[in-house]
Image (cartoon, rainbow, N blue to C red):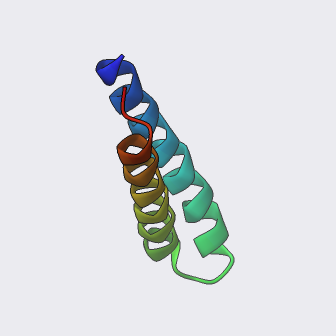
Amino acid sequence: MKKFRTVAAIVIMFFAAVAGYFAGAALQSEMGGAILFAVIAGFACVIYNMDNRE
């Protein structure tokens, strides 16, 4: 189950980075948006996993 959560977190961060890339493109800062969205999603995944230990 731990490996599934890790893979799910990585997939979520990847899709958040892609969404951030396109959102940042509207503001002329593609990589900044991608990094920002990926970091926010990563923190959310870490907090979720810490809160829901089995």
Q: Is residue 21 left or right of residue 10?
A: right
Locate residue 19, reporting x and y percent: 62, 56
**Vertical relation: 8 (above or below) 22:** above
- The residue located at (57%, 63%) in the rendering is 20
Pick whichever, 28 or 15, lies toward us. 15
Q: How many marks?
A: 0
Q: Quadrant of the C terminus?
A: top left
Looking at the picture, does residue 3 appear above or below residue 11?
above
Q: Nearer the viewer, residue 37 or 29?
A: 37
The percent position of residue 27, horizontal first and vertical second, equals: 64, 83
The quarter of the picture where residue 9 lies is top left
Q: Viewer-proximal residue, 47 or 6?
A: 47
As drawn, the residue found furthest toward the front would be 54
- Left/right placement of residue 26 relative to residue 8 reads right
**What is the quadrant of the N terminus in the image?**
top left
At 30% from the left and 20% from the top, the residue drawn is 3
How far from the left and from the top, in percent, is residue 12? 51, 41
Residue 17 horizontal/vertical position (percent): 50, 55
Residue depicted at 63% across the width and 62% down the height: 22
Q: Nearer the viewer, residue 47 or 10?
A: 47
